Image: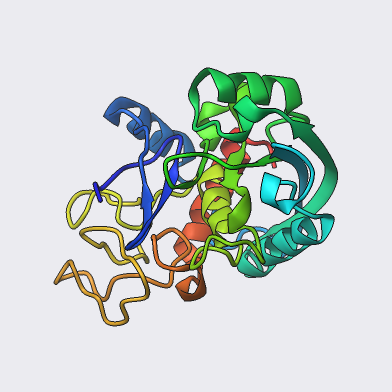
Amino acid sequence: MPEAPVEETPVQAEAHGRGCETKDLSETERQAVEEAIAGRVSAQARAIGSVNIKVYFHVIRKGTGISNGDVTDTQIAQQIAVMNKAFASTPYRFTLAGTDRTTNSTWYTSTGGSSETAMKKALRKGTAADLNFYTNNMGGGLLGWATFPSSYKSAPTQDGVVVLFSSLPGGTAAPFNLGQTATHEVGHWLGLYHTFQGGCTGSGDSVSDTPAEASPASGCPVGRDTCSTAGLDPIENYMDYSDDACMTKFTTGQVDRMESMVITYRGL
């Protein structure tokens, strides 16, 4: 499994764990982002639960029925509930603003490229402050990908997250079927890097209270310590690659970073 930085974030469900193939920000772009958000927000600057994010849910299916990717309204409601629980210690709450269902065999197996561009151009709704959430049956063992807040200005129609339909609560993508793929991707959409960004050296994920780790975790390896001077690896963090059942937390520093990013780039 290659270590991968983040921009658009395909997350791959491999036999041994969660993985990503990602388009990195250039060093110049990354530095520009850090300069733009520097000093914007102190930790927990806004009240918990005070920022509502509208979610437009786009179900891409091959036909009717769950085996064709036609996730149920119940699953969508459960996914929103999982996200709200995961972000319970943050200012953000997610409210379903609408659901549409599209039968399109090309978009159903899209892993990016021209099919993703066409899908999002046709379906995307709202502004930079609104989350467009797409589900399909992406190929290659992928679980999902997302765009960063800083990318919205240059490519607004591409903004959002794309998630494997069977990773929603009650889906068949075990051990990634409790809805935390969405939490992970929404974390990127709100501006977070992976916890293993940059390995044991450098600025890492640009968050001071997430211990550095040399590589992504898989499963739930309690006590894992891949960077000897940093503390135990943050395997429970939503921005690692652990199994869904292992993911339980965002840190205060991550909330601070999300706030800086969304205020700067999403107008939230």
Q: Nearer the viewer, residue 38 or 188?
A: 188
For the image, the number of numbered tags is 0
| Residue 28 quadrant | top left
Residue appearing at x 75%, y 55% in the figure? 94
Nearer-the-camera pick, 36 or 174: 174
Whether residue 154 is visible, yes or no, is no
Residue most extreme to the bottom: 223
Left or right? Give the position of 212 relative to 133.
Answer: left
Residue nearest the viewer, comparing 51 with 225? 225
- In the rendered image, residue 47, in percent from the top left (x then y), is placed at 70, 63
Rendered location of residue 135, percent (x, y): 65, 43
Instruction: Residue at 75%, 31% (x, y): give it.
Output: 103
Give above or below for 96 relative to 156: below
Q: Is residue 25 above or below residue 209?
A: above
Residue 2 percent coordinates (x, y) = 24, 46
Q: Is 40 situated above or below 196?
A: above
Q: Is residue 26 above or below residue 100?
A: above
Q: Quadrant of residue 262?
A: top right
Q: Nearer the viewer, residue 67 or 113?
A: 67
Q: Is residue 11 left or right of residue 202?
A: right
The image's colour scheme reads: rainbow
Q: Is residue 163 left or right of residue 227?
A: right
**Residue 121 image point, x, y percent:** 68, 20
Residue name at image x 35 percent, y 58 percent: 195
Q: Which picture quadrant has residue 225?
A: bottom left
The C terminus, quarter of image: top right
